[in-house]
Amino acid sequence: MVGMAVTTMENIFPNNLPDIKDMTLAECEAFVADMGSPRYRATQMFRWLHKQQARNFGEMTNIAQKFRQEIALRARISIVEIAHVLEASDGTRKLLFKLEDGNYVEGVLIPGRNHFTACLSTQVGCRMGCTFCLTGKMGFKRNLRPGEIVSQASALLHFHPDISCGNIVMMGMGEPLDNYDNIIAALKIITSEFGLSFSAQKITISTCGIIPQIARLGKAFPVNLAVSLNAANDEMRTKLMPINKKYPLKELLAVCKDYPMPARRMITFEYILIGGINDSLEDAKKLSSLLREIRCKINLIVWNAIPDFPFASPSQEKVEAFQKEMIRNKYTAIIRASKGSEIMAACGQLGRAKQQTMSLIEA
């Protein structure tokens, strides 16, 4: 942590009642059973919480009033508010979510050809310290609970009746695998037929490369994996991403090679191209050699400018030359279009929506 006090559950919620939104269906069934009530009550509540987005137990009108009164004394339903929405000219929307303890996180709706992608945050801030990322500069405040992650997903998936979301990516603020247990619980709720009913094959977890958790994730949940690589040698990757000192490239790529991807899918390696740092033709050749034994595709991302950061975006010529070298070596290499940079919603830019919102209000 970077100069931040640890936020505990007790000082967030003085009454200390468990949040029903944090529970998977199995946990909710056990909770209901401990109350002496039939387990099907859990399924009923799940539908109300995640399909009808009930904000209190009183809204659950097909459940016996006595049960609703009793559970209201034993549990609560958290509320994550949409504090503000910023919209870019390319159709990207950035949502500022206010949490119950007064912290804020950001979620993004990214327009695609036929649908939007919902990008979720998993932590308030981040402790990974990647030098090119605004969220990393914030430092770490706390992990998001499962219910807070699911609430973002629900808000983004139901943001507008004309917006259809085809994918969910955990690529927002924070390192998902640094909050492993909570993202697994959130995934169970998001994919439950009584929860958000979203396909696991359309969910991607992005990580900077926490090796033990990558191995655990592969065994626990059939989601897509994206690994933020950004360099083809340990020296440069450690400078850009301090996590590489603990989990170097050779060990990281070994666990990626063994990751059980869903059928006909490949691991994605994300490579942020930074001008004069990692964008040379030689870098492309090294990357091609490095990934030779892994079935993968490469997303090439042009670094998105952040005020006061000591980096520059590469030229279009260098980006295209890098891509051509990867393609020449038989890789699928896609230059990912930058979406939402004008509202600081692009890759690496999350972390300033609260300041943007306050500026708009004051204006």
Image: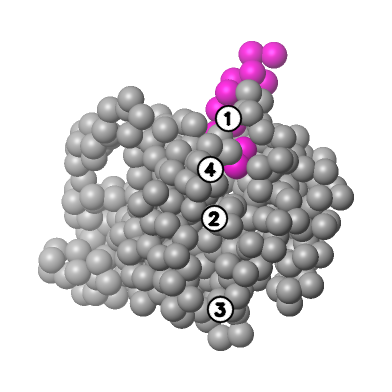
Q: Residue furthest top?
A: 362
Query: Is residue 197 shown above or below 213?
Result: below
N-terminal-most mark, 2 or 4: 2
N-terminal-most mark, 2 or 3: 2
The residue where tag 3 is placed is 293
Q: Residue furthest right?
A: 317
- Contact between marks 2 and 3 (CB within 8 A): the answer is no
The stretch in magenta equals 348-363
C-alpha separation, residue under disc 3 versus residue under disc 4: 24 Å
Residue type highlighted by circle 2: Asn
Judge from the rendering whether residue 309 lies leftward or rightward of residue 335; answer left or right: left
Disc 3: CA contacts within 10 A as few (<14), some (14-19) or many (>=20): few
C-alpha separation, residue under disc 3 versus residue under disc 1: 39 Å
- Estimate the x, y position of residue 28 in percent, counting from the top left: 27, 65
Query: Is residue 38 shown above or below 126?
Result: below
Tell me the residue at 19%/51% (across/down). 74
Residue type highlighted by circle 3: Glu
- Is the C terminus in the top left, top right, bottom left or bottom right quadrant? top right
Camera-nearest label, 2 or 4: 2
C-alpha separation, residue under disc 2 versus residue under disc 3: 16 Å
The residue where tag 4 is placed is 240
C-alpha separation, residue under disc 1 versus residue under disc 4: 21 Å
C-alpha separation, residue under disc 2 versus residue under disc 1: 31 Å
The residue where tag 2 is placed is 233
Tell me the residue at 69%/63% (across/down). 285
- Contact between marks 3 and 4 (CB within 8 A): the answer is no
The residue where tag 1 is placed is 352
